[in-house]
């Protein structure tokens, strides 16, 4: 300390001869000898200053400059060395202009502050768009093609394919992606009925939205690759949720009634087809019976004709007798020849009674 080297005493006007700054000597132990005297604090400080002068070249005047230079060099070296993680890529800038080279994962060096570096992640990232149906936010409200309002919540999965374009071609890539994705979803939802968004065609809608987002971001040169678009939730606004549920229940009842009608129709149709098949089978059987009978009669006629051809007179007489027999066997008339005498008391009218009684029994 400066005052320790002065012979005239401390800075407050104290006396010399190892006197303190308040004009009195240092405290000594009472009643003891000089061998147990504690070390002087000022002496310890003075020795430390001397050793420091010996270590620093040129003393304090040149050593301070060297220390400052070393500190500045260490700070510059720390700022010039940077690390790129495995899921990152870096782009160096020289005087604010990006270089063509892309810094891969590892340890890198650049001339700071003439050169700087911008680092971005290249792994898959997720951008959530829209608000939940239970939320009061109107971020995801969209108008469908059938004039219904739907609340769509979806997410966009993307990766950075060109770090240089991603960092410098557009001002805010996440905000731009969010606006483009929301615009694309509104465009597709506006072309379709609400039912497609709720249940029927979610995957088709997501595919169309992904195509529009990718083409738009490519036209901006954003350096982004869209991996997928996932529709997480699609529901009516909270204010009309009850009415929409009623409509859904009515549509479900309609589907149920249609299904029951189809089942009844199929049942009746099956019965009618069974009956028609039965009638066709009966008609086919009747047809076969009639055809077989006709063929049998024709065959019998052919057989008779063959016999007639062999003996025409005999066959003709036989046919005549068989025919007359079949005609007259149930007749009530009695035919008597010209030269036969009939007794007047012959009861001709009684001859037919037994035949009538047999026919009645």
Image (spheres, rainbow, N blue to C red):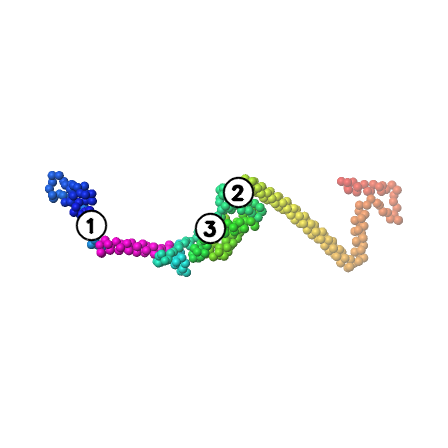
- Quick one: label 1 or label 2, which is nearer the N terminus? 1
Q: Which residue is mark 2?
A: 237
| Along the line of sight, the residue nearer the viewer: 273 or 112 | 112
In this rendering, position of residue 83 left or right of residue 352: left
SS for dot 3? helix
Coordinates of residue 246 in the picture (x, y in percent) = 56, 40
- Residue lying at 80% horizontally and 47% vertically, measured from the top left: 329
SS for dot 1? helix
Q: CA distance from mark 1 to mark 2?
A: 79 Å
Coordinates of residue 215 in the picture (x, y in percent) = 50, 56
| Along the line of sight, the residue nearer the viewer: 93 or 218 | 93
Q: Which residue is mark 3?
A: 175
- Residue lying at 37% horizontally and 54% vertically, measured from the top left: 85
Q: Quadrant of residue 249?
A: top right
- Residue lying at 73% horizontally and 56% vertically, measured from the top left: 299
Location of the C terminus (image quadrant): top right
Q: CA distance from mark 3 to mark 2?
A: 25 Å
- Is residue 284 something that shows in the picture? yes
Q: Which residue is mark 1?
A: 48
Coordinates of residue 143 in the picture (x, y in percent) = 55, 47
Q: Report the mark closest to the observer, 1 or 3.
A: 1
10 Å crowding of disc 3: few (<14), some (14-19), many (20+): few
- Name the chief secondary structure element in magenta: helix
| Along the line of sight, the residue nearer the viewer: 24 or 163 | 24
- Quick one: label 1 or label 3, which is nearer the N terminus? 1
In this rendering, position of residue 340 left or right of residue 224: right
- Quick one: label 3 or label 2, which is nearer the N terminus? 3
Q: Are marks 3 and 2 in contact (CB under 8 Å)?
A: no
């Amino acid at each position: 300390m400066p005052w320790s080297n002065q012979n005239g005493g401390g800075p407050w006007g104290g006396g010399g001869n190892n006197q303190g700054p308040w004009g009195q000597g240092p405290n000594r132990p009472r009643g003891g000898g000089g061998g147990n005297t504690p070390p002087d604090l000022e002496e310890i400080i003075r020795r430390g200053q001397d050793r420091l002068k010996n270590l620093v070249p040129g003393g304090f005047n040149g050593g301070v400059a060297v220390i400052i230079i070393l500190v500045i060099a260490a700070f510059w070296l720390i700022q010039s060395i940077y690390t790129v993680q495995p899921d990152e890529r870096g782009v160096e800038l020289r005087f604010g202009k990006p270089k063509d080279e892309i810094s891969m994962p590892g340890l890198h060096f650049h001339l700071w502050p003439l050169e700087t570096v911008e680092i971005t992640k290249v792994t898959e990232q997720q951008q959530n768009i829209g608000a939940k149906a239970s939320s009061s936010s109107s971020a995801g409200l969209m108008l469908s093609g059938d004039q219904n309002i739907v609340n769509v919540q979806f997410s966009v999965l993307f990766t950075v394919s060109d770090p240089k374009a991603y960092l410098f071609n557009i001002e805010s890539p996440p905000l731009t992606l969010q606006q483009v994705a929301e615009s694309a979803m509104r465009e597709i939802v506006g072309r379709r009925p609400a039912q497609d968004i709720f249940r029927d065609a979610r995957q088709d809608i997501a595919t169309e939205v992904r195509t529009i987002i990718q083409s738009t971001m490519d036209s901006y040169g954003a350096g982004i690759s869209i991996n997928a678009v996932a529709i997480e939730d699609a529901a009516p606004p909270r204010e009309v949720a009850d009415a929409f549920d009623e409509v859904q229940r009515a549509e479900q009842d309609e589907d149920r009634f249609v299904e029951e009608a189809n089942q009844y129709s199929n049942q009746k149709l099956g019965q009618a087809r069974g009956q028609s098949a039965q009638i066709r089978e009966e008609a086919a059987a009747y047809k076969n019976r009639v055809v077989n009978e006709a063929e049998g009669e024709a065959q019998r006629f052919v057989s008779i004709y063959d016999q007639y051809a062999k003996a025409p007179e005999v066959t003709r007489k036989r046919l005549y007798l068989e025919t007359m027999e079949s005609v007259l066997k149930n007749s009530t008339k009695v035919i008597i020849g010209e030269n036969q005498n009939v007794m007047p008391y012959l009861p001709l009218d009684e001859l037919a009674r037994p035949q009538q009684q047999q026919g009645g029994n």
